[in-house]
Image (cartoon, grey):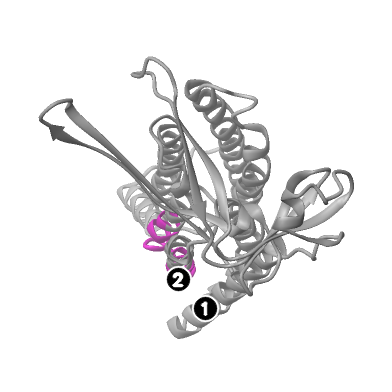
Amino acid sequence: MSEQQITPQSQLDAIHAMLDESRHSVRVDGHTLTIWGVAGGLLCVVGDLWITHENFPEAWMRALAVLGLVGGVLALAAGLDWRMTRRAHQLQERTLSFVHQRVRRVWWYLMGLGVAMNVGMVIFGGGFLSYSMWLFLVGLALVVQGLFSRQPLIPLGVAFQVIAVGMLASGVEYVALRWITAIVLGVGLPLAAWMLPRLESAQAVARHWLAMGGWLALMTALSVASVSLLRATSAPAGAEIPLAQWRAGGAVAQGPAVLALPPGAALPLTLTFNSDALERPLTVESEVKLTRPLWVEMVSGEPGARLRSGAGPWRKSLYALRVRQLSFRAQADAEAGLRLQASMRMDVRE
């Protein structure tokens, strides 16, 4: 058996083959988007149900829980994705190019950055931005990969970033943000994995953007439908009881009822402020007056989960109340040294 001769020409052909391989388009396999999408969707659904103030009363406890849960699940997703990608390339007798490996590391870096930012938000505040932050990072990772791919990943990444910005601009509640993110990741990424192979053969850029526009419209429709379902509720059972009758003791303590509060009704308000810099909590008793009628569900003599304001529909109280402004500042005072001022604005949706 004669040994294969290594000639300058064969070496040159090998170098050309290596360079050609490095110039190949980075292709994102369908299982990659599906794995990351399912992992992200499950984290959105499970995370806030387990990581609560009741289960983890201290901020550092919640931060460790976020690090363990989110970081652990994403690490498992990264490992599974890497193993399946390598196996797919081996079966197809292809090698992972240098660019492909580096772009994959960029994805891992951005996901790790998201975990670090999530932990920071738990400790220092700003958790309302967390879901939009995750969608924006996923969109950024897709745009980076799209720069080295013939797949329409750039339009897909831009669509993710549009949704992230739209979530903040819409002013929807935190719970609604969680379910919108779960839908976009858990449904949108697997759907994109199904769409990409069918769009890869189409070289028309306009068709890519049109398809991703349709994807964005579908995700928007699903998000709006989910928010509507979360907010929607039927009118509570029980007779309507005017405030005067309730105060006179004519209301039945047991059983469902609806307390009707007229405009101008004066309601006692108790404000409690506490801080580690204060010797004891501060409690302020005051009174507020309603500017429009308010109906509140009463269950066994206590307020329930539903209310109605003005001419609006019945809502769950979680989706009817929203804090628009919260501020705290100090001013110089000639006698006390410092005068502290705190303000808050809360709107009740009709």
How far is mark 1 from mark 2, CA to CA?
Answer: 8 Å
Badge 2 amino acid: Pro
Query: Residue at point 38% right, 54% down?
Result: 22
Mark identifier at residue 149: none
For the residue labelled by badge 1, is the local secondary structure a helix, a strand or a loop? Answer: helix
The residue indicated by pointer 2 is 155
Badge 1 amino acid: Gly
The C terminus: image quadrant: bottom right
Q: Is residue 82 above or below residue 346?
A: above
Left or right: where 73 falls relative to 64: right
The residue mark sitting in front, 1 or 2, is: 1
Q: Position of residue 225 (x, y in %)?
A: 68, 70
Within 10 Å of the Cα at label 1, are there few (<14), some (14-19), or many (20+) other Cα atoms?
some
Q: Could one spot residue 92 in this view of the protein?
A: no
Tell me where the magenta segment starts and ends, as one range. 140-157
Task: Work out whether mark 1 precedes mark 2 in sequence or the reverse, and give the earlier one.
Answer: 2
Query: Residue at point 55% right, 51% down?
Result: 174
**Residue 167 shown in magenta:** no
The N terminus: image quadrant: top right
The residue indicated by pointer 1 is 213
Within 10 Å of the Cα at label 2, are there few (<14), some (14-19), or many (20+) other Cα atoms?
many
Q: Position of residue 43 (x, y in %)?
A: 63, 42
Viewer-proximal residue, 305 or 94? 305
Q: Main secondary structure of the magenta part?
A: helix
Q: Position of residue 62 (x, y in %)?
A: 54, 26
**Could you tell me how many numbered marks the image carries?**
2
Left or right: where 349 falls relative to 170: right
